[in-house]
Image (cartoon, rainbow, N blue to C red):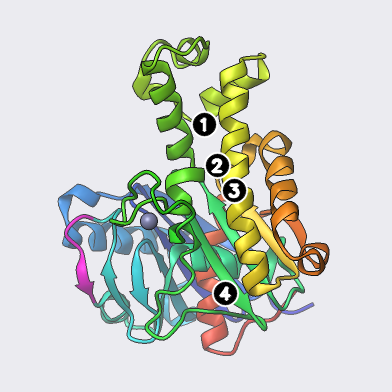
Amino acid sequence: MADERKNLALGIDLGGTKILTAVANAEGKMLSRDHSITPAKEGQPAVVKSILESVGRALAQAHIAVPDLTAVGVGAPGLSNPETGVLFTSPNLPGWRDVPLRDIIEKELGTKAFLINDANAAAVGELYFGAGRGARNFIYITVSTGIGGGIIIDGKIYTGSIGVAGEPGHMTIDDEGPPCNCGNRGCWEALASGTALAREARNRINEGATTSILEYGGGDPARINAEVIHEAAQAGDNLAAELIARTAYYLGVGLANLINIFNPEVIVIGGGLSNIGDRLLKPAFEEAGRRAFKQAYQAVRFARAELGRNSGVLGAAAFALEKMSGARRT
Ligand SMILES: [Zn+2]
């Protein structure tokens, strides 16, 4: 039995609303885990300060100090370059532009650090310790308020020429579709995310549709979300069922594109919307099957993500260890 305190990494999952920090070993065992709020509105110095405080608590909880770490991995939302460690821009971190986040963390902590996109980190987490274990080619998709993803090719995260690859949420599905946060329209996430599902429900209610969705949201249109719509669908609401079927349809269209381009062994699906389960995923997989090449579709296995909220923080830690050539596949 290897010493579980050897080859330790610190993973940081920086989100727009929360910071998750954990000390983990090369087998994905977490020795500590700290959860705090991201003061995103207070700007970059406040966020960096919060990260460092969280790191301090995670180290103390694991009874170790910075010199005990092999490296630090930072998963951050938005577009970043893992080679240079620069976060270009992030929709979840207002005001952040071309921030050398890796260097800031390295300097503050005095140890080697690596930067990776948050959804790519989650993909690496699932690759090492979750539903992608053992796969050489797989795609991780997280469907929640948006659609993020990570593409693993030949056992490595594919990040493209300047690091911003792996944004399947922004492939165009409908050239005249609804506007997307990225500036384009008809992107996958503008049609198949939880935000898209809730928006469509509000539109239909405004048009006078007969439905109990609003009641399940406590009468407040702002409280309509995927969970509320799922609840209404489970209770037999026709519109809710129709809207989930529509989301499944668009999910399937995007999955077919990914299957035809990448011919993956496994597609791992995580994120809040995947909690709807079979009502959403089964018709999505079927739609993908109607559209993708038969051989590629038959070769792919669909799996639900296994690590939940820990995928990003564990993936960031594993990415750092991989970069230091210290991680072992389980
Ligand atoms: Zn987009």
Nearest-to-viewer mark from 1 and 2: 1
Horizontal side, residue 55 vs residue 324: left or right: left
Q: Nearer the viewer, residue 298 or 76?
A: 298
Q: Quadrant of the N terminus?
A: bottom right
Which residues, given as a range, are shown in magenta? 94-99
Q: Secondary structure at mark 4?
A: helix
Query: Which of label 3 and label 2 is nearer to you?
Result: 3
Kindly identify which residue carries mark 2: 272
Cα distance between the residues tagged 1 and 3: 14 Å
Q: Which residue is pictured at 24% across the width and 58% down the height? A: 47
SS at mark 1 in the image: helix
- First in sequence: mark 1 or mark 3? 1
Q: Tell me whether circle 2 and circle 4 mark residues in contact (CB < 8 Å).
A: no
- Image position, residue 189 (x, y; %): 45, 50
Identify residue type, mark 2: Gly
281 vs 81: above or below? above
Identify the secondary structure beneath mark 3. helix
Give the residue type that dot 1 points to.
Ala
Image marks 1 and 3: residues in contact by CB distance under 8 Å: no
Q: Position of residue 32 (x, y in %)?
A: 53, 59
